[in-house]
Amino acid sequence: MRRRIRRRYAAERRFRLLGLGAILLSAAFLAFLLVTMVSNGLGGFRQTEIRVDIDFAANTLSAASAGGEIEAAVAAAAEAQYGPGGARALSDTAWLRVERAIEDDPSILARKKALWLPAASAIDGAAKGDGDGEAEALVTRLEQDDAIRTGFNTDFLTGADATDPAAVGIWGAFKGSLLTMLVTLAIAFPVGVLSAVYLEEYAPRNRWTDMIEVSINNLAAVPSIIFGLLGLAVFLNTFHLPRSAPLVGGLTLALMTMPVIVIAGRNAIKSVPPSIRDAALGIGASKVQVVFHHVLPLALPGILTGTIIGMARALGETAPLLMIGMRAFIATPPDGITSPASVLPVQIFLWSDEVSRGFVEKTSAAIIVLLAFLLAMNGLAIFLRNKFERRW
Amino acid sequence: MNSMTDTVAATPLRNDAAAKMTAREVSVFYGAKKAVDSVSIDISQDNVTAFIGPSGCGKSTFLRTLNRMNDTIANARVEGQIVLDGEDIYAPAMDVVQLRARVGMVFQKPNPFPKSIYENVAYGPRIHGLADGRAQMDEIVERSLKRAGLWEEVKDRLQDSGTALSGGQQQRLCIARAIAVDPEVILMDEPCSALDPIATARIEELIHELRGRYAIVIVTHNMQQAARVSQRTAFFHLGSLVEYGETSEIFTNPRVERTKDYITGRYG
Ligand SMILES: Nc1ncnc2c1ncn2[C@@H]1O[C@H](COP(=O)(O)OP(=O)(O)O)[C@@H](O)[C@H]1O
Ligand SMILES: [Mg+2]
């Protein structure tokens, strides 16, 4: 007797330890992921800038100057100030900043003006402690002149893809992801919920509905790249929708998300107690009234949870979007759901494939943005669920 | 065998002058299984009718044919004829939604909506368009809660959840909800089986008060309850109606052996 009790206690303790171990292991993985990403990626949100004194009065620039002229003038000023190689210390797109400065305040064309311009990625890396000897020597020299600084990289949050890692931004891909998700939600949510309602509340139980049920369950397990091929064949080749557009990406991901919503929706609807349906039917509510006044409101928290899970999966999806051409180099943020766009995971994939060292931290920074997006979405899910779960 | 018969007794109240509903040879099948076998009965307007009988004998099933709640069960099939005020309720022209507003139902387990007390009562009148404006709705809610004997207890917390009430209060709320759409018949399926004795007494009292205004049918497995609340009693056994008559007659002087056995507690 006593021994049996002791054995039971030991078993319980063992089980608790095992559970605790599992939790700790997953927490450790999560912490490792976060620490790596953050330590690699934080640099991506900072940008090194070099001060260049440009004597606008001495050169021939005017408000109407073409880009090439400005570029040449900026290069000349940098060489004059920092010797040969000075021009190469600046990012390829540094002249854009000068152009903007002229637009903002044309009066500078008559004076000499010190402007902070983005550094080339080699200098940027050296300033952050990861560069070659030549670049580091230049950085030391610039530091003595107080001509170099590292600040928050607003361009990264407002720009789009570029060939120069110092000039890339995440906003283009972020907006693309946002538009794609909106399309996915707009299609998958209503269709998924209506299918779930029909299958649970209206469909007769027979061979056909059994078959539909099996198909939907299988659909939810189909590898995502297959959906990409389907999207390619149907939306691009048959319907000739625009390539690389959030519309097509959203439709493709909607195909993938729908079964998840249908399954979650059916389970949520099934868990509404039948006594509620009886109560409503018993006082003369029609079937539609029962569904919309009672069943759906009670099932909503479950449906929303399922939807967010499906959407989160869609947000991180890369393979199907590669199939429908969303891997193109897109240097401007999309204007709408039909203009070419990139999305966050594809952008991460593209940057991680680049040889230039400057892209490493940009890749990690983009991952941080994607994770933040995911966290925001999950936060929204929890908020909505708690809001609707207030069952009186 | 004594002098009593063992056949389905002639139902002496069949042609009750004040019959609100009449059922003729009603059978109900679940798939191939016959749960109710050719039941004919008249439901009186002015009296409370009790259905008694051992568990599984088809009382609930038959009760649910009276407002076509069996339509919601996929494999249930009803044969025979049921008439409400001269209208065949299984006729194709019959609107089931309207029928259920006229023949209300109170279930075994209290099942208020997970909404406010006010909303629980107001829901039926709202979907049937019975109230013009807020003031009239307030009036309907108050009247229904008063008739259900719940008003005094909840008048200061109408916005509280209906599911936060006690079991007995919940069941009276369900009765108020049924009353709110102004039905002609109220069907109650063992409305007290989940309640304590005090709450049960409260509901029985309420049934007395409602009698006359509504035709009431109550299923109960509790014979004392049937004796207390009803004027007519129908005894069901194995899907058939064995005996139907004045409650006092059935309990003091049953004419069928099986009824007597059941009432004296020989089985159940
Ligand atoms: N939904 C159903 N499907 C199949 N059989 C049922 C269903 N509901 C009840 N039955 C069967 O019908 C018979 C009568 O049930 P019921 O009317 O609930 O009896 P009672 O209310 O008198 O206890 C029982 O044998 C029961 O098993
Ligand atoms: Mg029953």
Image (cartoon, helix red, strand yellow):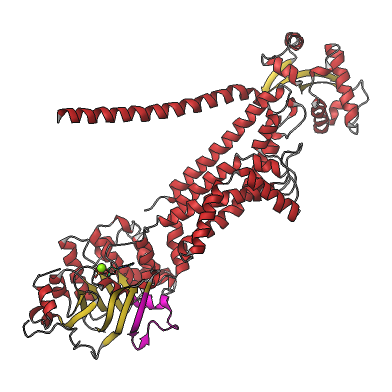
Would residue A373 be counted in the magenta stretch?
A: no
Percent across and percent down for residue A269 are 44, 57
Q: Residue at x 13, y 75 (%)?
A: B227
Drawn side of residue B16 relative to residue A358, left or right: left
Percent across and percent down for residue A231 are 68, 49
Question: Taking the image as four quarters, which one is ligand 1 found in?
Answer: bottom left
Q: Quadrant of the N terminus of chain B?
A: bottom left
Percent across and percent down for residue B210 are 24, 76
Q: Residue at x 54, y 26 (%)?
A: A33
Drawn side of residue B223 relative to residue A179, left or right: left
Up the image or down, A258 lies above or below B61; here it is: above
Would residue B85 be counted in the magenta stretch?
A: yes
Q: Residue at x 26, y 80 (%)?
A: B213
Up the image or down, B25 lies above or below A64; here it is: below
Drawn side of residue A386 relative to residue A15, left or right: right
Q: Quadrant of residue A5?
A: top left
Q: Depth check: B129 or A278 in front?
A: A278
Q: Quadrant of the C terminus of chain B?
A: bottom left
Percent across and percent down for residue A122 are 74, 18
Is residue A361 in view from this perspective?
Answer: yes
Q: From which residue to which does the magenta span run?
A: B77-103
Residue most toward the left?
B2
Q: Depth check: B131 or A261 in front?
A: A261
